[in-house]
Image: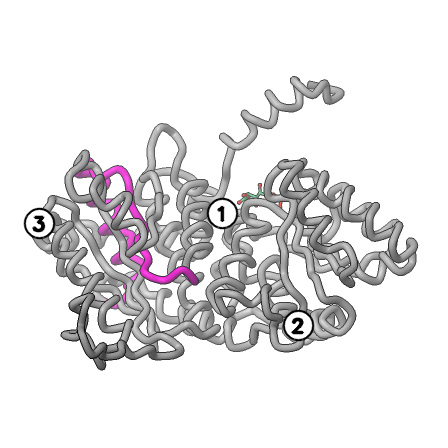
């Protein structure tokens, strides 16, 4: 039973059934290319079968358990696709303040190497001084500058603290199975390693040890997560738009894009979804933005951003559409109390839950934005469980791959990312640049 449902009523005046049906044959062709590996970027289609082929649970779990037993701070070092999936999953499933008051016997989780900020990393070092630290460095290429720099600093700190042998036992490397500087270093120094499959690109790698190992260290049930992803793999393996919500969402995006709605805003109503939105932005942005084409993916967090970006969305440039991510049921319900004097005028809500108010905020926003000329759709999510999260990850991977193919681009490469690197390396005087 799916924990996700897509609702497109607020698109009816922007996209017709006829337009949707007209795209079915193109979706069939793109789907066949994804299935038989005849489309662009076909060397990187391994993500689509990760859930059904998953057999790493025991190895990931036992390493995670050994790490959980010996540290109270766990640092995940990586950037882009080697960072955002783990962060999204951990934030989605954890308590909002888990690092502040402990994580049910597990370590606090921190992230490094996703920027080159001296202050950020120095502050992190201050924070972990005096704590027992373990580290997972993640890089498929093994050569990415940001995580490599952070790893140098952290490795030195850990070797000073624990000695080389002690540090070795506290460092886990996730990288290519045979290539790259990180793989060579791991082999030379004897680190425990997890391999990233050759046919899975960075931003599609959350369902490999890249995402699963840090999540397991955070105490997340990765088998349940992969069971959810497996269900999604089955549900979204049919090209019929009537039966595949991931493809239906992709088609809506493509049709809106063709009508000049070139920016998609992923709007959430839950702080726990913040990094899920960041993961989605990377997945969609790096996959679709190329050849002078592609939807610009952005995100807002409501209701906070209704007091900020809400004005722009309601009355600004009409080149946007919205996708709401709505949680159907919170883990805990808070009821609004009655006040004797009703000074704040909220007694009309006494006895209602915050969920009820948040739901009405979503409904009110969706209809206001539709009236204001912003087409919107909603992906409803049953709960904050690993099972739902596995479905969400797979849903968006399928949808983004399909949108890329519908728009005629290779959704599995990222040639544009090299440009800043070349300039930076030249400025830094890196040999060969
Ligand atoms: O999606 C991608 O391929 C990129 O975002 C990479 O994940 C990111 O650049 C990090 O690369 P690497 O894992 O090689 O360090």
Q: Residue furthest front?
A: 341
Percent coordinates x, y for residue 33 in the rendering: 39, 51
Task: Give the extent of the magenta segment.
Answer: 243-272
The residue at label 3 has a CB less than 8 Å from ligand 1: no
The foreground one among 108 and 169 is: 108
Describe the element under mark 2 as helix, strand or loop.
loop
Q: Which mark is residue 106?
A: 2
Separation of marks 2 and 1 at Cα, in angstroms = 39 Å
Of the two numbered discs 2 and 1 on the same chain, state the one appearing first in sequence: 1
The correct choice, above or below, for 98 with respect to 36 in the image is below
Separation of marks 3 and 1 at Cα, in angstroms = 42 Å
Colour pattern: one colour
Q: Which residue is mark 1?
A: 42
For discs 3 and 1, the disc positioned in front in the rendered view: 3
The correct choice, above or below, for 310 with respect to 418 in the image is below
Q: Which residue is mark 3?
A: 371
The residue at 63%/42% (across/down) is: 120
Residue 76 falls in image quadrant: bottom right
């Amino acid at each position: 039973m799916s924990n996700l449902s897509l609702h497109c009523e607020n698109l009816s005046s922007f996209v017709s059934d006829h337009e949707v049906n007209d795209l079915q044959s193109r979706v069939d062709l793109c789907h066949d290319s994804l299935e038989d590996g005849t489309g662009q970027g076909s060397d990187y289609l391994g993500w689509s079968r990760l859930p059904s082929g998953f057999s790493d649970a025991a190895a990931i779990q036992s390493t995670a358990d050994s790490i959980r037993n010996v540290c109270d701070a766990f640092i995940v070092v990586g950037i882009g696709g080697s960072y955002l999936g783990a962060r999204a999953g951990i934030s989605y499933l954890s308590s909002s303040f888990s690092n502040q008051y402990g994580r049910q016997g597990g370590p606090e989780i921190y992230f490094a190497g996703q920027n080159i900020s001296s202050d950020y990393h120095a502050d992190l070092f201050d924070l972990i001084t005096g704590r027992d630290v373990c580290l997972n460095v993640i890089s498929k290429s093994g050569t990415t500058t940001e995580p490599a720099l952070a790893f140098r600093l952290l490795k030195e700190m850990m070797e000073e603290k624990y000695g080389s042998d002690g540090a070795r036992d506290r460092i886990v490397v996730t990288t290519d199975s045979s290539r790259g500087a990180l793989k060579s270093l791991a082999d030379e120094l004897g680190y425990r390693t997890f391999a990233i499959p050759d046919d899975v690109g960075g931003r599609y790698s959350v369902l490999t040890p890249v995402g699963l190992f840090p999540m397991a260290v955070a105490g997340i049930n990765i088998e349940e997560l992969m069971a959810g992803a497996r269900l999604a793999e089955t549900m979204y393996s049919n090209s019929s738009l009537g039966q595949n919500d991931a493809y239906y969402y992709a088609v809506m995006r493509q049709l809106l894009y063709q009508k000049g709605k070139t920016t998609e805003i992923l709007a959430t109503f839950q702080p726990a979804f913040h990094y899920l939105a960041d993961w989605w932005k990377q997945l969609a942005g790096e996959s679709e933005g190329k050849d002078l084409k592609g939807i610009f993916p952005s995100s807002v967090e409501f209701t906070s951003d209704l007091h900020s970006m809400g004005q722009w969305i309601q009355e600004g440039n009409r080149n946007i559409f919205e996708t709401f991510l709505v949680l159907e049921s919170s883990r805990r319900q808070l009821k609004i109390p009655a006040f004797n004097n009703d000074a704040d005028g909220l007694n009309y809500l006494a006895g209602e839950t915050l969920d009820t108010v948040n739901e009405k905020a979503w409904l009110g926003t969706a209809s206001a934005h539709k009236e204001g000329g912003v087409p919107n759709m909603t992906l409803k999510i049953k709960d904050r469980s690993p099972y739902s999260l596995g479905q969400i990850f797979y849903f968006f991977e399928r949808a983004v791959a399909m949108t890329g193919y519908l728009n005629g681009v290779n959704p599995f490469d990222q040639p544009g990312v090299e440009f800043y690197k070349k300039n930076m390396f030249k400025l830094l005087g890196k040999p060969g640049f």
